[in-house]
Image (cartoon, grey):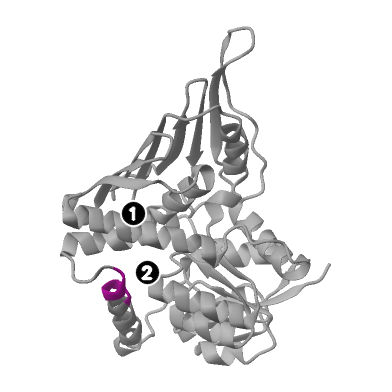
């Protein structure tokens, strides 16, 4: 098996909790020779902890090395680094949010086409064995009538406290100014001048509820209309109603419940003859499986409820395996940037619906 040399840009929580341990597990598929972070302490600590030979604080130095691929886990927006990576001829895995505006996405797509390399969005939910099992069930349904998403989100620190995440206060404040300016520019490109609560909702949709948005698209296709969008609790709650071409409706809600340990994220598809429910753990967990429940009536008219056994391999590991297959075997990317563009457009439509009241 061909090993892919991959560099990591951004050594924060998602890299330390998920990607680096998983890349170590996938030692036949990947080799990690170098990591990068603005924080010298974080870059050095991560390199030592995961036995990585080299570390840098400037991503351009990493891109000059012979790594074939890069995994972008740094702060948002990631567009500048992604464009530089494509220009350097690298395969690129971009953790969510991929970007904020369609202009950013189109620039990345153009750069990827010119480079001729793989570009994968970090949409791990659709690689989850439970999601894929549920999708097979949904695909057998005659139709669906109602869909519901509930995403009850506690403070991430409650779950990160279960891990030894190393952090360092060694980056001067001015080092973050370019990213802040790029973030403001991307927001202006995407949606223009909007109220503070709408801004919070926009970044909430792009940063956390994006998991629900792309999973819904992969499961059922894109909605035909954003019927309504409500932002409440000072931008810490979002409720959306989507319409689908078959007349079905989806009600999707994300709410911040910061002081509760219990994380709840569900996708529920209801048809006349079958119901499929998927329940996910937080992304800041390891070894906790998603669950699938299926309700139906069998050929004898007997009502049943079943919870199929879900494979143990995590969604994060599966998405890395898929990235390797795309690079080494030419597999079609399941979470391509082209597909992710639909999600950016939908987020913009949701915020516009809220701002315009329609």
Measured as percent of width and height from the top left, residue 25 is found at 70, 61
Q: Which residues are magenta?
A: 186-190
Measured as percent of width and height from the top left, residue 20 is found at 60, 67
Q: In the image, 7: left or right of 200?
A: right
Which element is circle 2 on?
Answer: loop
Which element is circle 1 on?
Answer: loop
The CA distance from mark 1 to mark 2 is: 23 Å
At x 60%, y 32%, the residue is 137
- Pick the residue in front: 13 or 298: 298
Question: Residue under circle 2?
Answer: 100
At x 39%, y 36%, the residue is 148
Q: Is residue 32 above or below residue 238?
A: below
- Pick the residue in front: 285 or 300: 300
Question: Residue under circle 1?
Answer: 155
Measured as percent of width and height from the top left, residue 136 is found at 62, 36
Quadrant of the drawing holding the N terminus: bottom right
Q: Quadrant of residue 33?
A: bottom right
Main SS, magenta residues:
helix
């Amino acid at each position: 098996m061909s090993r892919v040399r991959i560099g990591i840009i951004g050594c924060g929580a998602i890299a330390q909790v998920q990607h680096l341990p998983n890349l170590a597990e996938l030692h036949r598929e990947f080799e990690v020779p170098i990591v990068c972070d603005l924080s010298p302490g974080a870059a050095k600590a991560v390199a030592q902890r995961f036995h990585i030979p080299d570390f840098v604080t400037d991503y351009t130095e990493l891109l000059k090395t012979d790594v074939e691929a890069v995994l972008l886990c740094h702060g948002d927006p990631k567009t500048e680094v992604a464009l530089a990576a494509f220009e350097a001829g690298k395969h690129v895995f971009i953790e969510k949010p991929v970007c904020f505006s369609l202009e950013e996405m189109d620039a990345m797509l153009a750069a990827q086409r010119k480079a001729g390399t793989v570009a994968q969005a970090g949409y791990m939910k659709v690689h989850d064995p439970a999601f894929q099992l549920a999708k097979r069930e949904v695909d057998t349904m005659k139709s669906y009538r109602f869909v519901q998403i509930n995403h009850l989100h506690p403070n991430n620190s409650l779950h990160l406290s279960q891990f030894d995440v190393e952090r360092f206060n060694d980056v001067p404040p001015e080092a973050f100014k370019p990213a802040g300016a790029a973030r403001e520019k991307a927001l202006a490109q995407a949606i223009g001048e909007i109220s503070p609560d709408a801004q919070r909702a926009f970044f909430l949709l792009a940063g956390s509820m994006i998991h629900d948005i792309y999973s819904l698209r992969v499961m059922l296709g894109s909605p035909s209309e954003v019927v309504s969008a409500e932002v409440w609790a000072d931008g810490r709650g979002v409720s959306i109603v989507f319409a689908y071409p078959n007349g079905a409706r989806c009600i999707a809600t994300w709410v911040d419940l910061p002081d509760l340990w219990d994380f709840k994220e569900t996708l529920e598809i209801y048809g006349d003859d079958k119901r499929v429910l998927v329940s996910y753990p937080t992304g800041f967990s390891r070894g906790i499986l998603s669950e699938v429940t299926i309700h139906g009536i069998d050929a004898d008219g007997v009502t049943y409820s079943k919870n199929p056994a879900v494979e143990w391999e995590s969604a994060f590991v599966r998405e890395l395996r898929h990235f390797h297959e795309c690079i080494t075997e030419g597999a079609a990317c399941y979470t391509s940037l082209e597909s992710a563009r639909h999600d950016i457009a939908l987020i913009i439509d949701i915020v516009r619906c809220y701002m315009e009241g329609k």
